[in-house]
Amino acid sequence: MTTYYSEDHEWINVESGVGTVGITDYAQNALGDIVFVEVPEVGDELAKGDEVAVVESVKAASEIYSPVTGEITAVNEDLEDNASLVNSSAGGDGWFFKISISDDSELEGLMDADGYKTFTAGLE
């Protein structure tokens, strides 16, 4: 499994043409206590960069963008009742959705873990 990161602070774990997407630990830290997550519908077709979800915290609301083009194949229904999963496990149980990737070449525009670490260090 390979993990990529976007400049909008989403991560995507890719395995067998399907990506699992969430927000990074950096993003959840910046947002603070997350109180609500709106995820897309299974079957939604998305283009790379489309707004796909919304996260609300005690500090702000933030849009989540799709890092790739594809079709939503699953959503994390646990977030409906337990949005704080994003705070406690941003890179694990706090995932948002799974997407069947239409164009693998779009992954080339994303960062690896070292690139993302360098990117976020430049933001502080």
Image (cartoon, rainbow, N blue to C red):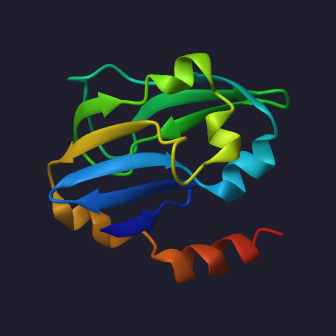
Q: Residue at x 52, y 76 (%)?
A: 113
Please state, as top left, top right, bottom left or bottom right, where the C terminus lies in the image: bottom right
Image point 68% across, 51% down: which residue? 27
Asked whether, in this view, residue 52 is left or right of residue 81, the answer is: left
Q: Which percent across, then down, holds residue 87?
A: 70, 42
Residue 110 drawn at (x, y percent):
41, 67
Q: Residue at x 30, y 65 (%)?
A: 107
Q: 78 or 59: nearer the eye?
A: 78
Numbered-mark total: 0
Name above or below for residue 67 compared with residue 40. below
Is residue 107 visible from the viewing direction of this image?
A: yes
- Position of 101 with respect to 27 (left or right) is left
- Tell me where residue 91 appears, x and y as whole percent: 54, 54
Report if residue 38 is visible in the image: no
| Quadrant position of residue 12 | bottom left
Residue drawn at 51 percent across, 51 percent down: 92
Determine the image quadrant of residue 80: top right
**Rendered location of residue 1, percent (x, y):** 30, 68
Please tell me which residue lies in front, 9 or 34: 34
The residue closer to the viewer here, 74 or 123, is 74
Please determine whether, in this image, residue 79 is positioned above or below residue 28: above
Picture quadrant where residue 40 is located = top left
